Image (cartoon, rainbow, N blue to C red):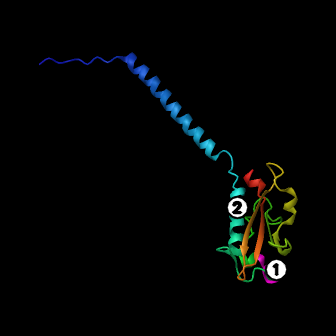
Amino acid sequence: MNKMKIIKNKKADKIISVYWFAVLFIVAAAIVYMVLSFYGKPYDIRQAEADILTGKIAGCLSEAGYLKDGVLTSDFKNNFLERCRLNFQTEDVYGWREQEQYYSEVSIFNFVSGQMILSANVGNGNLKEFCNQGKNSPVCLERTFYSLDKTNNQYKISILSIVRKTEKNV
């Protein structure tokens, strides 16, 4: 039997290994780039947080277009956090325990006369003057909707929600 000799081309192996290392380098560089772009800067979720807060307050005030019982009372105004089951406590980072990071304000007007019937607020009222003044300012969100009571009186309800947390999100 004839034995066939397999001749290896050493130059071809060297060229393939250079391409192999180039491909490995490109893949590694792409992975590093993706990780840095994903984890490199914090996401600013304050707008979403303010939107969720506004939605929770709106749900606390009105259901299916009608005001909930007891909303127009002074008890509601004095116990706004408890009645709406809100918690404005934040984690103890950047000294946030000393200075509240949230503010919410609810104003209810008679739709026909425009007269304010109820105004309730809770949180750090100082945040209101810095609303949306730039990148490092609190995010403010104001929403208005209309509702009826059981006797079909019409009301205009305005909700202002402010989230600060600038040290963590910006």
Residue on which disc 2 sits = 51
Which element is circle 2 on? helix
Q: Residue at x 68, y 72 (%)?
A: 59
Q: Residue at x 68, y 46 (%)?
A: 41
Q: Splitting the image into 4 quarters, where does residue 35 fall?
A: top right
Count numbered badges in the picture. 2
Determine the residue located farthest toward the front in the rendered image. 112
In the image, is 15 to the left or to the right of 164? left
Magenta: main secondary structure: helix
Q: Splitting the image into 4 quarters, where does residue 122 fall?
A: bottom right
Q: Residue at x 43, y 24 (%)?
A: 17
User: Of 79 and 68, which appears nearest the observer?
Assistant: 68
In the image, is 74 to the left or to the right of 40? right
Q: Splitting the image into 4 quarters, where does residue 80 fall?
A: bottom right
Residue on which disc 1 sits = 78
Q: Is residue 57 above or below residue 3?
A: below
* Distance in Å between CA atoms under marks 1 and 2: 23 Å
Q: Specify the segment rendered in magenta.
A: 74-80
User: Of 139 and 73, which appears nearest the observer?
Assistant: 73
Residue type at mark 2: give it: Asp
Labels 1 and 2: the sequence-earlier one: 2
Which element is circle 1 on? helix
